[in-house]
């Protein structure tokens, strides 16, 4: 059984890292089981192992934290649901690509419960939505926005970090970075797409989809 934990308020990033480190070490020691932790962070940027300094456009906008997860710069803040998934790939399959694919499927299935058609994009991380309501890209393609980010770290085949989904964050906070190193596209949220949902609604959808993707 996977333990689900939801924290109220805003959890500082160092506290989140400490929690994940302790939980992963306990899992490796055989004294704790898997956990999905749902939290919100105060406004901040995190720097992944592939981040480029030029993508930190406004270094003084918010505090920047080293995350040691894969990926580049990303934003976390109020109105965004972060789901830290501490899962044992020794039991679920030692395949990083397949695991990331399941995280993407988890997000896609969750958003489908709100009638949002989201998907993967070749060569780009995260989960995306088409924006036919906006002007097309210069090459004629339909405009697209990113609605969810994915970043993982794996220690001895125990995975941690996870996903973030934009429910109703202040999207202007993304202006301080090039999100995930991709400059040609925007970011969006459920609220930006006209979906009136609460964090509780999103959490319930996340748990239903997790059971579908990871358990059944």
Image (cartoon, grey):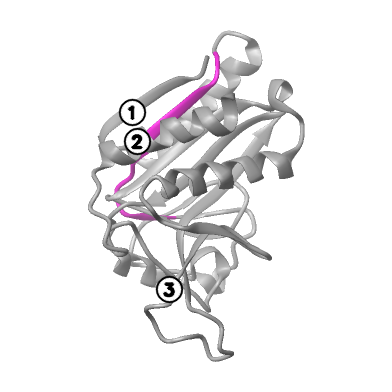
Image quadrant where residue 208 sits: top left
**Residue 117, horizontal then vertical, whole percent:** 46, 58
Which is nearer the eye, 35 or 30?
Answer: 35
Where 109 falls versus 136 (above or below)? above
Dominant secondary-structure state across the stretch colored magenta:
strand
Q: Is residue 113 left or right of residue 91?
A: left
> Quadrant location of the C terminus?
top right
Q: In front: 15, or 126?
A: 126
Q: Which residue is at the front of the view, 81 or 74? A: 81
Tell me if I can see residue 68 in this picture.
no
Q: Is residue 44 magenta?
A: yes
Residue 204 in the magenta stretch? The answer is: no
Q: How many marks are shown on the rendered structure?
A: 3
Closer to the chain start, of discs 3 and 1, is 1
In the image, the segment drawn in magenta is 33-45
> Residue at the top extreme?
31
Which label is found at residue 203? 2
Label ID, residue 6:
1
Q: Are marks 1 and 2 in contact (CB under 8 Å)?
A: yes
Name the N-terminal-most of marks 1 and 2.
Answer: 1
Q: Tell me if I can see residue 189 in this picture.
A: yes
Residue sitting at x 57%, y 47%? 104
How far is disc 1 from disc 2 in space, using C-alphas? Answer: 9 Å
Give the residue displayed 26% in from the left and 62% down from the top.
194
How dense is the environment of label 1, judged by Cα within 10 Å: few (below 14), some, or many (20 and up)? few
Which quarter of the picture shows residue 173?
bottom left
Q: Which residue is mark 3?
A: 131
Q: Earlier in the sequence, mark 3 or mark 2?
A: 3
Quadrant hosting residue 119: bottom right
Label 3 SS:
loop
């Amino acid at each position: 059984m996977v333990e689900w934990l939801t924290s109220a308020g805003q959890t500082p990033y160092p506290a989140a890292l400490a929690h994940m480190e302790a939980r992963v070490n306990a899992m490796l020691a055989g004294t704790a089981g898997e956990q999905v932790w749902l939290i919100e962070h105060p406004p901040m940027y995190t720097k992944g192992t592939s981040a480029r300094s030029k993508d930190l456009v406004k270094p003084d906008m918010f505090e920047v934290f080293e995350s040691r997860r894969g990926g580049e710069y990303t934003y976390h803040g109020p109105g965004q649901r972060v789901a830290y998934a501490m899962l044992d790939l020794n039991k679920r399959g030692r395949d990083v690509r397949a695991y990331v694919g399941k995280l993407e499927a988890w997000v896609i299935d969750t958003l489908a419960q709100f009638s949002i058609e989201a998907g993967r994009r070749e060569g780009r991380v995260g989960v995306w939505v088409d924006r036919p309501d906006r002007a097309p890209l210069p090459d004629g393609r339909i405009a697209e926005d990113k609605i969810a980010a994915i970043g993982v770290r794996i220690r001895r085949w125990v995975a941690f970090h996870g996903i973030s989904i934009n429910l109703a964050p202040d999207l202007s906070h993304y202006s301080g970075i090039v999100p995930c190193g991709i400059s040609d596209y925007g970011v969006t949220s459920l609220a930006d797409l006209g979906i009136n949902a609460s964090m509780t609604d999103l959490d319930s959808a996340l748990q239903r989809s997790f059971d579908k993707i990871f358990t059944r």
